[in-house]
Amino acid sequence: MNNKYKTINYKFKKRWFSSEVNTEELNNEINAQATNGWQFVSMSVVTLYGYPQSVVCVYKNVD
């Protein structure tokens, strides 16, 4: 079996004004990938001076 992985960097629109991750937007993106046959593996929040800039998500193909 040959596993395939992909990484997506979801950038936030409000970089400097908020210190919270938009979980609704992130959930929608993760669920969209799951619908396309990708299993969520992990994520990491990328910050700059303590403010989240983006979330890097790793997915594994389950086909």
Image (cartoon, rainbow, N blue to C red):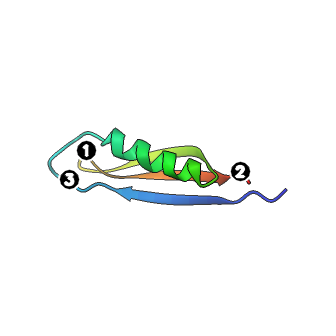
Q: Secondary structure at mark 1?
A: loop
Q: CA distance from mark 2 to mark 1?
A: 34 Å
Residue beneath label 2, please?
62
x then y, percent, for residue 35: 57, 49
**Disc nearest the viewer among 3 and 1:** 3
Q: Assess disc 3: are there few (<14), some (14-19) or many (≥20) residues with their C-alpha within 10 Å of its C-alpha.
A: some
Of callouts 3 and 1, which one flags the residue occurring earlier in the amino acid sequence?
3
Is 61 placed left or right of 32 in the picture?
right
- The front one of 48 and 21 is 21
- Residue at 35 percent of width and 40 percent of height: 24
Circle 3/circle 1 CB separation < 8 Å = no
x then y, percent, for residue 42: 55, 44
Q: Assess disc 1: are there few (<14), some (14-19) or many (≥20) residues with their C-alpha within 10 Å of its C-alpha.
A: few
48 shown above or below 41: below
Q: CA distance from mark 3 to mark 2?
A: 33 Å
Q: Assess disc 2: are there few (<14), some (14-19) or many (≥20) residues with their C-alpha within 10 Å of its C-alpha.
A: few
Name which residue type carries label 1.
Gly
- The front one of 47 and 14 is 14
Residue beneath label 1, please?
50
x then y, percent, for residue 16: 17, 52
Name which residue type carries label 2.
Val
Residue beneath label 3, please?
14
Q: CA distance from mark 3 to mark 1?
A: 14 Å
Q: Quadrant of the C terminus?
A: bottom right
Which image quadrant is residue 2 in?
A: bottom right
**Disc nearest the viewer among 3 and 2:** 2
Is 14 placed left or right of 27 in the picture?
left
